Image (spheres, rainbow, N blue to C red):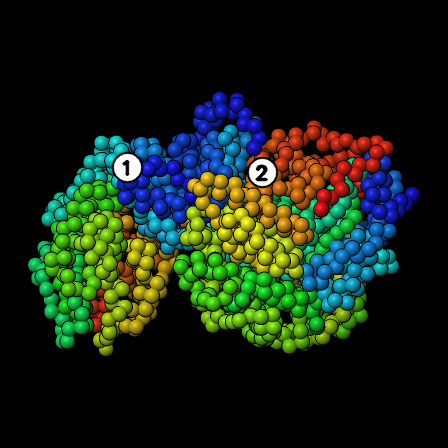
Amino acid sequence: MRTRFSDIQLADPALSAAEHELRKCVHCGICTATCPTYTLLGDELDGPRGRIQLIQGMLESGAAPSPTVVMHVDRCLSCLACVSACPSGVSYPRLIDEARAHVERTFRRPRYEAFIRRALGFVLPRRWLFRWALTVGRYASDIAALVPLPLGSLIDAAKKLPPVQRRRELAKRYPAQGQRRLRLALHAGCVQEVIAPAITASAVRVLTRFGAEVVLVEGDGCCGALNHHLGQTQVFEGHALRLAQDVAAHAADCEAIVTTTSGCGAVMRDYAFALHAEEGKAVGERVRDISDVLAELPLERVDALPKLRVGYHAACSLAHGMQRGVDIPEVLTRLGFEVVTPSDTNCCGSAGVYNVLQPEIAHALQERKGEAVNALDADVIVTGNIGCLTQIGAVSNAPVVHIVELVDWATGGPTPQALRGRISA
Amino acid sequence: MQVLRPESEAEAAALIAEAAANNRTLSIEGGGSKRHLGRLTTPSAVLKLDALREIVSYEPEELVITVRAGTPLAEVEAALAERNQCFGFEPASWSFEPAAAAATIGGTIAAGAAGSRRVVLGGARDHLIGFRAVNGAGEIFKAGGKVVKNVTGYDLPKLAAGSFGTLFTMTELTLRTYPRAATSLTLAVENLDVDSGCALMRRAVGSRFEATGFCYLPRVAIERLGLRQASSLTLIRFEGDAESTDARAHACGETLAVPFATVQHDDTWRLVQQLKSLQASQVLWRLSVPPTAAVGAIAALRPECFVVDWAGGLLWVEPGSASPRDVHAVARQFGGHATLFRGSDDLRRGDVFQPLDAVTAALTKRLKAAFDPHGVLNPGRMYDGV
Amino acid sequence: MPEPKADVFARRSALVEALARLVPEGVVADQDALAAYDCDALTAYRQKPLAVVLPTTADEVSAVLALCHREKVRVVPRGAGTSLSGGALPLSDGILLGLSRMSRIKEIDLENRCAVVEPGVTNLAITKAVEGQGFYYAPDPSSQIACSIGGNVAENSGGIHCLKYGLTTNNLLGVELALMTGERIRIGGKAMEAGGLDLLGLVTGSEGLLGVVTEVTVRLLPKPEVALASLVGFPSIETAGQCVSAIISAGIIPAAMEIMDRFTIDAVESYCAPGYPRDAAAILILEVDGIAGDVSRLLTLVEGIARKVGATSFVTSTDERERQRIWLGRKAAFAASGRIAPDMLCMDGTIPRRELPRVLSRIGEMSKDCGLPVANVFHAGDGNLHPLIMFDVMKEGDLDKAEKLGADILKLCVEAGGVLTGEHGVGIEKRDLMPLMFAEGDLAQQERVKCAFDPDALLNPGKVFPSLSACVEGGAMHVHQGRIPFPNLPRL
Ligand SMILES: Cc1cc2nc3c(=O)[nH]c(=O)nc-3n(C[C@H](O)[C@H](O)[C@H](O)COP(=O)(O)OP(=O)(O)OC[C@H]3O[C@@H](n4cnc5c(N)ncnc54)[C@H](O)[C@@H]3O)c2cc1C
Ligand code: SF4
Ligand code: SF4
């Protein structure tokens, strides 16, 4: 497609990368119908092709976009379904990320909204602060009615979470059981560590059980994804750099950097671009999702395993962000589970802090996903991303667990908490 | 009545222009075999196109044939048969008169005369891909093309099929052709009541066995045809090479789980196309309805005799005592439409085609005017003023 | 395009307000946002509309049309905006009427083998809704994941399976149509034939010039017992073309026959790795369906023919996944062109099959002469060519060169006995080429049809017809007395 950038603009690497993608887009519209917000709202401004055009307009002009344009850009989930759909190979993240940064730089949001975004970007990546906020949130039910919608839904979300657990002390290194076959670095996300620390524990158990030595890498505990999606570029880069440095310092000898939250993995994979530094490349090239790693481990099931009907929801960050997910259900089939997938393959609406910032759309997507998931009549729903876990957990009839928890259980670990009392071994 | 017989398209155009200039009206005719169809009109003269008789070009490997409008259907079909082809829509030689043999290709298409295969392969409308014609002002124009896949400009060939010569006079037609099946095999089920017979046909048409005909004959119809004794016949036809038809007919019969017999080259299909079992009555209606509505429509009309074709989509009905108004009401009630196919002159002065709602009627009139502003061509044949 | 109406611009804000009253939450008027609606999949022409309206119900559509009719404001309907001919290109003084919010499947009636849907439902969504019960909607344009059924009706879209199963027009039972006045008519329904003149056939393929489709009843077909796709490799695209003619001449009509050249094969391989033969200069993808026995017999026959013509390889899918992947590659072909060049023009002429080898090699020469690469991926069974002209709009003169080459290719098609467009529509793109195929009188006759539906020329004017002659009141046409009117001896 034609673009109209000046040479000065193109000297900026981020703009130049965006321009490269804009040129590749042939405006065919194949992506639109795969976009959750388009299918929901029926306006091309809420679809990828429309957004690409809005983004092109704002980046070319360099000026602050109109509030309408910002609204439509904000509504993007960054689920990247459009990337999987695009035959021309347009890398949409280059566009939406730059657009978010551009909005953040040039657009004055209403004061209240700006505050919420800043608060989210500040609190969530800090485990101690987030834990504290949740505790307050839990008691804030009466306040919820009084506060405007976005904050209200955050409080709602907090109330639905399991009670906050104190964080276990994590060791830095876990030896492989038996003969060591490989060495893996494990990144435990920030939000996940607060609301579902059992996932990291399961991951450590499964990986070590099948011959991996596991090294924990944390940086400041956050990969920066949340800030990234909020357009808070500098904060994101700070987090990313620290994590990359941590990896360089402690995990240089690891074959892969494993994430148990595909939302983090999808962003970390792109560190090379964000950081323009060797450290970034060293992370980006080696990041793998735990599901992907599980697919290659010589998993062996324990004998006394009930034959469960498992509903598998592929997180967008895994399926589209990391372009994996198609054959992940096979991991579960191999363990003797019956695997079914929901008819609705759209994003569940969690999408990082999206459910807080765009509660109405997130809610509609959640409902739709809930219907599809419940139609499966499964014993348990499995996914690989903390956001989906909580989002689907709120509407699913069946308990929802992380894939690594189920695999852990199936190969000798403890029964996942969500299944205790609901399924007899 | 004066009969004008143009020898060329140019002559036809001149005659029509002259009629338009002199406020005369023309009845457009091919062989005259479908004179009884449509409303009764009182034209000043007949424009008979049977002299425009020629196969202009026939390219079997392109599955396309171009013919002048007045070429006898039989002649065209014979040419196709020579190259092992046919018309996919199975042109029906509906007729009660010996003139059936005179049916021309132009008239066949203008009347939309499709047979049992229409349910699968489409009607006359789906097989006419281009034409040349003269409009009501005497102007020659063409539409469509000579290749099957074509969306250049409005699809006027669709409009031509079934327009009963009320819009323009076709002089040359380009049609798609179809490979001719080596054999046909009919799966016959006896003694089903109309409800079960229609249900069976719907299951068959929704199955994977690619049958090309689905019709149901009640006892009266069977008796009139002088066929074997049965209280009814449900017929499902398979076409193709012998091995294929055999496999499909038997697989279909087993899936339907009813006792059946198979008949090779069953002549009944031809008799059905020719409406042989419906010749006893002076009044005959043709209803096109959603297949599930067939039984209800028949019950509502309580006909003396009827034939169900297109798996329930087409009903031929001798309406007994039902008036045109009744028949149209029933057709509307069941989501379809009815056409008086044969009736007295008196009946043919009233509503022959299903009455249109006001907006569609007005649009139809404007459309007529767009082609035939002076009302020269078959005026009133379809509706008052059209 | 028709001269914009200055008075409409002057009334813009009042109009936007009135529209917002009729369709609350459904009007886009922000200038920056309107940029995203400035074209469909033909990007060479762009124009922001006066405003976009996104109704949710047929009543809202009627209300918008009635208002525009009263106010003499032009309207351009839009489905999913995937038209390749610019059919949905907005007018600066016109409302863009988007049907994307009308996306409900209203009824699935398998007993009558049909589905009743709103116009914004995507083509693929219909099949998805019924495939569980063993049915499907046959026409399958490559854009089926995105394009709307309303757009399909307006364009009379085809697809890879229309060789055997027909285009959109052959698979419809009825529509509800809103006229420019806002009045709605029902044409057809669940019965096989509609009564009266075949308005359904006329409206299908009318490119949004006659009315706005507000509901569609489509015919559903039972899924075949077996469908197998074969990949046949050829040493040249011409031999692949010969093979297609040979198969049809043998009286065989496969479910699909598609040809792709090396260029496209490479682009698609990097998108979804469908496993096309690496050594072939062109491939023929051929699908045969039916009951198992028939399919295997036909495949043997077809393979024999292909080998005789010079096929270098013949591989048949072994399971449904493989077949789907083969087609995924084919369906991605246009859209994957962005991997080869930043811009493409997709031509769409149809020619008699026997002309395939000659026309294809001529297109190759023309491409060389003008220096723009042309990829060929097309519905070979129907003789429906899709030369994809690759260019770069940002290179001075490239667009002009591409358009000229495109026009020359279409001229070539018409000369070969073919037509300008087989399934993508005339739109704005081929409008000025219409005289290649039709004489003035032919076009005048078609325009009078437009007048019968929309005498004020408010609905999508400027598309399809090179000149927009005013409609004559009362339909009065001149009859030249004494002079035999032959103004239109065909030009070709
Ligand atoms: C990658 C790609 C592949 C394609 N492959 C094929 C193919 O294989 N076969 C094929 O035939 N086409 C193909 N197309 C073209 C296009 O997808 C079709 O023409 C499609 O039918 C357009 O549908 P739409 O909903 O996008 O309509 P739009 O592009 O929005 O509109 C197309 C036309 O229809 C009119 N219109 C839309 N909706 C309505 C309505 N409800 N009532 C009245 N008028 C309306 C518009 O005014 C316009 O004139 C392809 C396009 C792309 C981009
Ligand atoms: S990332 Fe998801 S929400 Fe955003 S445009 Fe793409 S498909 Fe739509
Ligand atoms: S699918 Fe790709 S090329 Fe097509 S419009 Fe979407 S982003 Fe652009």
Q: Is label 2's Cβ within 8 Å of ligand 1?
A: yes
Q: Quadrant of the N terminus of chain A?
A: top left
- Residue C51 x/y as whole percent: 46, 32
The chain that hosts pointer 1 is: A
Determine the CA span between mark 2 and mark 1.
38 Å
The residue at the point 28 percent across, 50 percent down is: A350
Q: Position of residue B292 (x, y in %)?
A: 61, 58
Query: In the rendered image of this protein, does residue C263 appear above or below residue A116?
Result: below
Is residue A231 at least partly visible in the picture? yes
Three-letter residue code for mark 2? Lys
* Residue B224 sits in quarter: bottom right
Side of A272 where C420 appears, left or right: right
Q: Residue at x 16, y 50 (%)?
A: A241
Q: Mark 1 belongs to which amino acid? A: Val
Q: Is residue A121 visible to the viewer in this orientation of the structure?
A: no
Q: Residue at x 56, y 36 (%)?
A: C460
Please identify the quarter of the rendering in which residue A151 is found: top left
Q: Which residue is mark 1?
A: A103
Quadrant of residue B16 within the rendered picture: top right
Q: Which residue is mark 2?
A: C463
Q: Secondary structure at mark 1?
A: helix
Q: Nearer the viewer, residue B31 or A84?
A: A84
